[in-house]
Image (cartoon, rainbow, N blue to C red):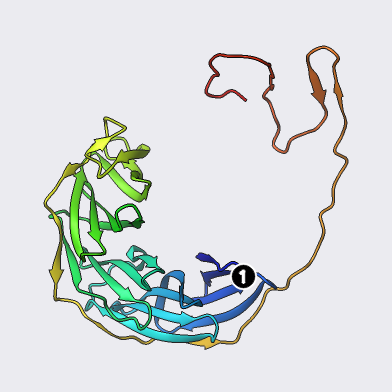
Amino acid sequence: MTLKNDESEIYVAGVHSSNKVFTLNSADFAVIQTMSATMFTLSSIYSYSISGAEKLLINGNPLLGLAYEFIGADLGSNTKDWGKSLTCLLTCSASEYIKSLILNTTDQSIQLTLVSGTPIFYIIDLVDGSVSGSFYKANLGESNMIPSDLSYSATNNTVIILIKHNDGMHKIEYDISTSSFTSSYTISTEYGYFIKENIGMLYIGGNVVATNAIFITKLIGNGENSLNSDFVMTLDASTFTSSGLHSIFNGLGLSVSTSSGPSSLVSSLTFTDPGVYTISTIDSSSSDVVYQGGFTQTIYIQESYTGLFPFDFP
């Protein structure tokens, strides 16, 4: 499910249990379009804009497993703009491994897909669904590779790729301006599931391999320098190589069905008696206000105090 706010309306797009795409308009909370898929398993929906027009990118996997589908739909006209398929000849992996990153500034979608157990990286032009550049195949020499996350680094104008595998994880960067993979780092003690960059700092979260404990770490730069001495990524020569084994062809697409809307009910808030409180003339106060779920802590207030506070100070 995805949400798009264009400053005048909020659109919510999701996948219906009957294999339909639907979008909600916040103005009257009505379904403004539904689209059904034929022989098609929906995996994800992303909203994007081209010249101010609201669009949807719909990813999925045909039930026969012959290809991945990538469909562009127009929210204004309720029609399909284009439908493309990545051929994978009965080797399509589970559709939940499709990762997309929308770059509105360039009208492009970065795609990371698992085919024959190997991550495939490519870029789709959101105007017509064509491939921008080449297909690239992960060359990590690892087993059970899973595309974990894609994120954009505004600091370096790069796409950060995170891939989990049996021997930990790899973090790879793709330079958009040069259309090349610029670095690859790995670590064998953690599995990574999400990665984000903010103001030069890198944040990775996942599980520790040995204990399965949950972790989140903050790294400096590429990860060779870390604020956490137990988490240091090492430079690796493995990255992605150009692949000519894949191609895009016209896909089946979606059919628009009759719109249907949930009923909306306008109501107002009602308030109950807030209770009363008394203030002591000395140094304490009490209240009969009851907090939902209970409130067992006592709050202390002291003026003109200089010193240390405990971590859980209320």
Compare residues 258 and 178 and report the one nearer the observer. 178
Q: Is residue 296 something one can see in this rendering?
A: yes
> Tag 1's secondary structure?
loop
The C terminus sits in image quarter: top right
Residue 52: where, in percent of width, then height? 50, 76
Please tell me which residue is depicted at 18% across the width and 56% down the height of the picture. 182
Residue 158: quarter of image: bottom left
Q: Is residue 80 placed above or below 12 in the rendered structure?
A: below
Q: What is the count of numbered marks?
A: 1
Please tell me which residue is depicted at 27% across the width and 43% down the height of the picture. 221
Q: Amino acid at mark 1?
A: Glu
Residue 305: where, in percent of width, then height? 62, 14
Q: Label 1 belongs to which residue?
A: 9
Residue 267: where, in percent of width, then height? 81, 62
Please tell me which residue is depicted at 85% across the width and 16% down the height of the picture. 280
Compare residues 185 and 92 and report the one nearer the observer. 185
Residue 22: quarter of image: bottom right
Residue 91: quarter of image: bottom left
Is 159 positioned to the left or the right of 247 in the image? right
Is 312 positioned to the left or the right of 210 in the image? right
- The single residue placed furthest to the top in the displayed view is 282
Q: Is residue 225 placed above or below 161 in the rendered structure?
A: above
Compare residues 234 and 209 and report the one nearer the observer. 234
Residue 11: where, in percent of width, then height? 57, 70
Q: Is residue 247 placed above or below 117 in the rendered structure?
A: below
Please tell me which residue is depicted at 28% across the width and 68% down the height of the picture. 93
Q: Is residue 62 something one can see in this rendering?
A: no
Is 295 positioned to the left or the right of 40 in the image? right
Disc 1 crowd rating (10 Å Cα; few below 14, some 14-19, many 20+) is few
Is 232 positioned to the left or the right of 275 in the image? left
